[in-house]
Image: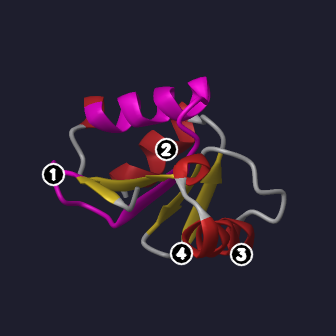
Amino acid sequence: MTVVQIPGKKSRHIMLYALSTCGWCQKTKKLLDDLGVEYNYEYVDLLQGDEKEEAIRKVTAWNPSCNFPTMVIDNKKCIVGYREDEIREALQK
């Protein structure tokens, strides 16, 4: 599995690192879908070998605890967990 791009309104560069079995990750994806924004996501738990190590390095650079979901917006802001209000606010700017 590699990065998947979901089409939508292009407002910001959004990268979501998620786990395929995580309910909070699914809620975050649904929120992004409902907002109609373009975003990218990657299921870190489905990666293997070097791809998985690289994804974990990227996540821990933003979120040293390596919790999921981890959303990086414009390579400037990181939101960890399902934080609907914070996500909505960040995407309205």
Describe the element under mark 2 as helix, strand or loop.
helix
Question: Looking at the image, is mark 4 or mark 2 earlier in the sequence?
Answer: 4
Up the image or down, 56 lies above or below 46; here it is below
Amino acid type, label 3:
Ala
Q: What's the CA distance linking mark 4 and mark 2?
A: 14 Å
Residue 32: % across, % down: 35, 38
If the image is split into quadrants, where does the N terminus sit? Answer: bottom left
Say which of marks 2 and 3 sits in front.
Answer: 3
The magenta-colored residue range is 6-33
What residue does disc 2 label?
A: 87
| Residue reaching furthest to the front | 49
Give me the residue at 59% from left, 68% from top.
55
The crowd level at tag 4 (other Cα within 10 Å; few <14, some 14-19, many 20+) is few
What residue does disc 4 label?
A: 76
Question: Looking at the image, is mark 2 or mark 1 earlier in the sequence?
Answer: 1
Residue 7: % across, % down: 16, 50
Q: What's the CA distance linking mark 2 and mark 3?
A: 20 Å
Q: Is residue 37 left or right of residue 90?
A: left
Q: What's the CA distance linking mark 1 and mark 4?
A: 19 Å
Amino acid type, label 2:
Ile
Q: Which mark is residue 9?
A: 1
| Mark 1 in CB contact with mark 3 (< 8 angstroms) | no
Describe the element under mark 1 as helix, strand or loop.
loop
| Mark 3 in CB contact with mark 4 (< 8 angstroms) | no
What residue does disc 3 label?
A: 61
Q: Is residue 39 left or right of residue 44?
A: left
Give me the residue at 74% from left, 68% from top.
60
If the image is split into quadrants, where does the C terminus sit? Answer: bottom left
